[in-house]
Image (spheres, rainbow, N blue to C red):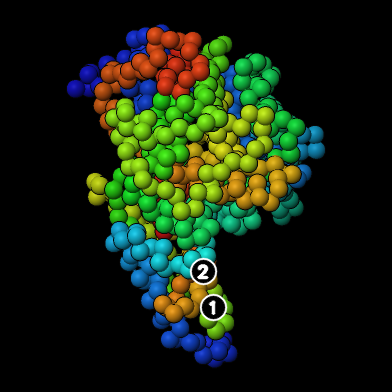
Amino acid sequence: MGTTTDARPTPDLMLWLEIFETQSRYAHAIDSDDLETWPAFFTEDATYTIVSRENHDRGLPAPILHCRNRAMMRDRVVALRNANIYEEHRYRHSTSGPVILEADGDSVRTETSYIVVRTGQAGDAEVYSAGSYHDTLVRTDAGWRYRERKVIYDTSRVLTLLATPI
Amino acid sequence: MTQMTTRAADREVSFPQADGSRVPYRVFSSQEVYDREQERIYRGPHWSFVALAAEIPNLHDFKSTFIGDTPVVVTRTEDGFSCWVNRCAHRGAIVCREKFGNRADHTCVYHQWNYNANGALQGVPFRRGIKADGKRLTGMAKDFQQENFGLRTLRVADFHGLLFATFSEETPDIEDYLGPEMQPWVERIVKGRDLEYLGCTRQYAHSNWKLYYENVKDPYHASLLHLFHTTFNIFRVGMKARSIPDSRHGLHSIITVTKPEQDADTAAAYQKQSIRSMDSGFTLEDPYLLGQISEFDEDTTNHIQTIFPQLVIQQIHNTLVARQVLPKGPGEFELVFHFFGYADDTPELRELRLLQANLVGPAGYISMEDTEVTELVQDATVRDGDATSFLGMALDAPDEQDTNITESLIRNFWAGYQKVMGY
């Protein structure tokens, strides 16, 4: 009892809190339909990818959404606001605390489980997506930013469509 | 009350026009129609797309999928491919529970009946009984013959890496099935090419599969529902277009769009017609995903080809996809996008193919609306089975094929569907 716990290095709780706080603000921005601020959680050269666990586990690259830089994230938001047609809806994210896999000064690699409940116009709510974030964050002057965020979803069938990012 | 319900259920599906221009809404929600489709279409003389050969590249690789709503497994064998109904000959349990994998044989978990890759039964536990306390306990029935209890196997056709299966002995060879009008267009994408599977995306819709089939035979909606093009000034008025039905029965079809030499001012052209797509002034910060690397004799921007009943071949810019349409009941279907490239893709081409996954699929800039509109139709038509839709665009010019402002492919589809279904 306690051996494995004792053998672990003392976790950097401050770092953990900072990452968790970043994740919470990220989810809050999306859940508040404040999509215009969503790209600001990333570095300019960041990648954002949503891919099924089925593909990820088999080493297959086909994503349902992939932004190769922050410009593409801004494009996505402009398209959602002005071009694409979809039922109005809200997300509510529920996330686990981040698990820090690797911390190297100003760069951290983490994984975080999530559930997104989507509520449509009729008040119909469903577990729309469940999976995990695989992230690399970097410390910038403005705080922690995602340099790579990979959303790997377990819920292999996307219900109707995916408009709002996860 | 009971009487009325019975009478309504007994009512025949009736298409008021043989030309397919009026479709009774009942066909989108009736369980009876759905069951008849399973029998006449998916169990009938048709080839259903089941897999890309590139998904199962090694001996004994397998994939679980469906023909209509019947679960099947397709697997690579020593002499080609085998496809069998995924249901144990013993008590009817699903034999293979994995989506994909590699196995030389498959064992039902219930009583461990074991089948080889071709679906032949090769082992039954306690077949000859067991010895207990010096007594021999009886095994399987005396007249049990193992060779009569294989899995139900289907015919398989490999058309340049596209795998099809059929339940029926009457289904013609795949070349005849595709026919002279469709075959060259399918070959354009797959013939002489070494396909590489890049993964799939799955989408689930609460609507009837035929509403999606209408959608992929409907070039009329493209610039009206999908405003991405016009918002970002991408769709060019004056595109060269084709809308070609299979003239034998109307069930297969192809739509192509090819860019004109000269760019036109799209927004102005649309504005003149007062179409709701005036949000011009937007530009993409990173428009790279809208590029196209030349790779065909004619670089169509769109090639959307339906091979009845469960395949849609798609080339949009440089994305290549085999879409599988799987009915899950009268009001549900699943859509599986199988992305592929060619083994000799340059890194730039491969990157662009994957980047253009942003255009199609559940989150696709120019496709995300499609499943939702099928649900809008499903929800609004469920009660009025005898009311009909009206497919009148270019009705007076049934032979016009060089247009995308037409509903002729949908009409042709319904005309063929009526014959197949005996309506």
**Residue at numbered disc 1:** A107
Asked whether disc 2 touches disc 1, contact meaning CB atoms under 8 Å apart, the reply is yes
**Residue at numbered disc 2:** A147
**Which numbered tag is attached to residue A48?**
none
Which kind of residue does numbered mark 1 sit on?
Answer: Ser
Residue at the limit of the structure toward the left, as seen here: B1
Q: Residues within 10 Å of mark 2 (few under 14, many from 20)?
A: many
Which kind of residue does numbered mark 2 sit on?
Answer: Arg
Q: Residue at x 48, y 13 (%)?
A: B400
Left or right placement of residue B410 versus residue A93 in this view: right
The N terminus of chain B - image quarter:
top left
Q: Residues within 10 Å of mark 1 (few under 14, many from 20)?
A: some
Q: Residue at x 35, y 15 (%)?
A: B392
> Where in the figure is residue B171, as x and y percent of width and height?
64, 18
Q: Quick check: B76 above or below B346?
A: above
> Where in the figure is residue A88, as x and y percent of width and height?
29, 48
Q: Residue at x 51, y 54 (%)?
A: A66
Q: Nearer the viewer, residue A2 or B274?
A: B274
Q: In terms of sequence position, does the residue under pointer 2 or pointer 1 come before the other?
A: 1
Q: Nearer the viewer, residue B211 or B367?
A: B367
Q: CA distance from mark 2 to mark 1?
A: 9 Å
Residue A49 visible within the image: no
Which chain contains the residue that carries disc 1?
A
Secondary structure, mark 2, is strand
Q: How many marks?
A: 2
Secondary structure, mark 1, is strand
Residue at the limit of the structure toward the right, as seen here: B78
